[in-house]
Amino acid sequence: MPFAMEKLAPRERLLVEELMEACSRAEAIFWRQSDPEGAALYEKLPAGKDASDAALRRFLWINGGRWDLLDGNRPFVGREPMPPGHWLYPKDLTRAEIESYVAAHPDERKDIYGERTVIARREGRLAAIPYREAYRDLLTQAATALREAAEFSDGDPAFARFLRMRADALLSDDYYASDVAWLELVDPKFDLILAPYETYMDELLGVKGSFGAAVLVRDDAESEKLAVFRKYVPEIQDSLPLPPEDRPSLRGKAAPMEVVNAPYRSGDLRHGYQAVADNLPNDPRIHEEHGSKRIFFKNFLDARVAEIIIPLARRLLREEDARASARGYLIGTMLHEIAHGLGPAFARVDGKRVSIREAIGPPFSALEEAKADTTGMAALSWLAERKAVPAEQLPECYASFVADLFRTVRFGTAEAHARAEMMEFNFLVSEGAITREPSGRYALHFEKMPAAFSKLSKELLEIEAAGDRKRAEAWFAKYDAMPPDLAASLKSLTDVPVDIDPQVPFPESIR
């Protein structure tokens, strides 16, 4: 996305340039995790005049590898299927083999299931290689750039301190202290995401993080508008339909919310699904003890609403229901990110507290996205009852939400967000909140939305609290297939983009 570097003071410009340099190293690590063979092909393809080479190069960049993320992860180069664990595991390793191995070597389970280890075969055994060793060269370069950036953060010593702590974390694989320091930043003008936070890439165990990064510049005016939502976060948590032990109190916990522009993104924040918001960090200990930060990427959100959300609403909803708006979409997005930090911090399995991500396994990403969607929308009616959101705004929020369902399911259910929202769409249909008109357009029954969202939110929260993988798999199996009539409607929308593609120069080297 274009960013006016010339508007920055000279030392601010140097700060941003060093942050971008650090983020570019995260990009290179991401390709090692995702598809190093695709990275080699990308670099061999000339960026010049040949249209077919240029198109292939661009498609490799958009997908972050050789598999089409909008077509069930089918290969568009060669015939090799996408390894479910990408290059985080040996290609031929199966979940069953891992489970058998850790049963025979229980002392190695923690490292094998570690969020920041790469698994390799060595002398007939499985070896867990820490990220700090597997990517040492690139992490060292990123850490150096962060320390250089800290030298230019004259006006914000707390941000400089965070940058130095994050540099240390990259080289130790221990992000806890720097995550806490990040949450304690107060309205920073510049901010940074750089860590292996998300686990979407790991479809084998669903636990290992891929590197993503973004340089952030705060929008003060828009950030101030979030205060009303931040105020109610602890009360919303207390209102959830779970026993107290499964909804730890958020009173006194950090809940910073920032509206930012992101002039530079890399790694898992740049390829495939283009996020317009984030709730970080993902460490359940941080959530339970300190809270989390909600970030809204204004430049990406504005583009999504204008180019995709509003056009889809106008084409697929009956005229009186096509009320999608930038305001309605922003409210829904804010509540989605708030809801990522709501509910249980851990699952209860056989009387023990365990990571929800580990307990649920590969379905976790879709489950968590659906939980955030539906718990956020259930919170919307809760807020309206307390007049924190005007009741007359609810229809545009619901219409914006459904238009986003149409947008996301176009990614195909191999993508976590799409699988989540396909399930949500089918559930709303089953509850009579969405119906298809003879015209082929969809009608929204706003009066049925609150009860439907509350019912679905309760189901998903209970699954997470119990860490019940079989229940999660059965729920998605029941609801995640795309109806033929919806598939036909979506197929006709070739003139509406599936996603945004930031127009920035592609790097010559990504390794």
Image: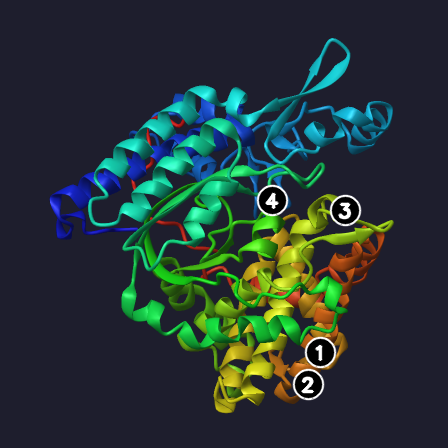
Marks 3, 4: nearer the viewer = 3
Q: Do the numbered discs 4 and 1 sit on residues whose CB atoms are within 8 Å? A: no
Q: Is residue 282 visible?
A: yes
Circle on res. 200: 4
* First in residue order: circle 3 vs circle 2: 3
Return the x and y of residue 26 as percentages of the image width and height. Answer: 43, 33
Left or right for 468, reference 290 = right
Q: Quadrant of residue 205?
A: top right
Say which residue appears at 55% left-offset and 74% top-offset. Answer: 316
Return the x and y of residue 487 as percentages of the image width and height. Answer: 65, 62
* First in residue order: circle 3 vs circle 4: 4
Left or right for 242, reference 143 = right
Circle on res. 448: 2
Distance of mark 3 from mark 2, alpha carbons? 33 Å
* First in residue order: circle 3 vs circle 1: 3
Circle on res. 359: 3
